[in-house]
Image: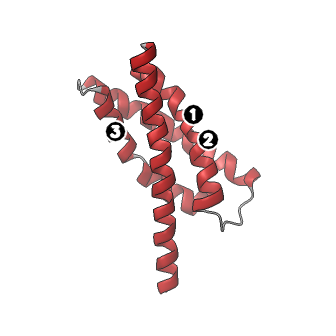
């Protein structure tokens, strides 16, 4: 039982590290596209989300859930479904916080802090 808890804690830590890296990439790309190229924050977030997805999938597949027996051809489509749902939740929440006239960096940080809990749960019990 103790080793099971230790294993889960390690998975959560790895998930947090990969998720933080993906969130940092997402956030950085949004800031760059908005500040340097004048993009609308929602459009910039869409591009950034899909780039960060690549980091997220690779990191979780090969590090966070590396002990999985689930094959790539099974895991990837499931993660893609979850990420599409996550994308719409991400954009919807971002839009909501922007409509409250929050500065876009703060609105994006809030969104990037809310969604990982759902993503970990679904990743652990359905995808990997």
Q: Name the residue under label 1.
A: 50
Q: Can residue 5 be seen in this view?
A: yes
Q: Position of residue 9 (x, y in %)?
A: 46, 71
Q: Residue at x 40, y 26 (%)?
A: 31
Mark 3 or mark 2: whose residue is earlier in sequence: 2
Q: Farthest residue in the left direction?
A: 101
**The C terminus, quarter of image:** bottom right
Q: Choose top left, top right, bottom left or bottom right for residue 36.
A: top left
On the picture, is 37 further left or further right than 81? Answer: left
Count of marks placed on residues? 3
Q: Name the residue under label 3.
A: 109
Q: Residue 54 carries which label?
A: 2
Contact (Cβ within 8 Å) of mark 2 with mark 1: yes
Q: Where is residue 100 in the image (x, y as percent from the top left)?
A: 23, 26
Alpha carbon separation for disc pair 3 and 1: 17 Å
Q: Where is residue 6 in the image (x, y as percent from the top left)?
A: 48, 78
Which residue occupies the foreground of this view, 38 or 73?
Answer: 38
Whether residue 29 is situated above or below residue 71 in the rendered picture: above
Mark 3 or mark 1: whose residue is earlier in sequence: 1
């Amino acid at each position: 039982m103790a080793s099971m808890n230790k294993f889960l804690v390690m998975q959560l830590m790895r998930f947090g590290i990969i998720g933080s890296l993906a969130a940092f990439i997402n956030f950085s790309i949004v800031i760059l596209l908005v500040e340097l190229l004048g993009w609308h924050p929602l459009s910039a977030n869409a591009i950034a989300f899909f780039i960060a997805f690549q980091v997220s999938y690779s990191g979780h597949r090969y590090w966070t859930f590396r002990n999985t027996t689930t094959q790539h051809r099974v895991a990837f489509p499931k993660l893609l479904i979850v990420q599409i749902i996550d994308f719409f939740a991400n954009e919807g929440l971002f839009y909501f916080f922007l409509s409250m006239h929050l500065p876009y960096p703060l609105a994006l940080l809030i969104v990037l802090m809310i969604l990982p809990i759902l993503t970990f749960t679904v990743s652990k019990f359905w995808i990997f």
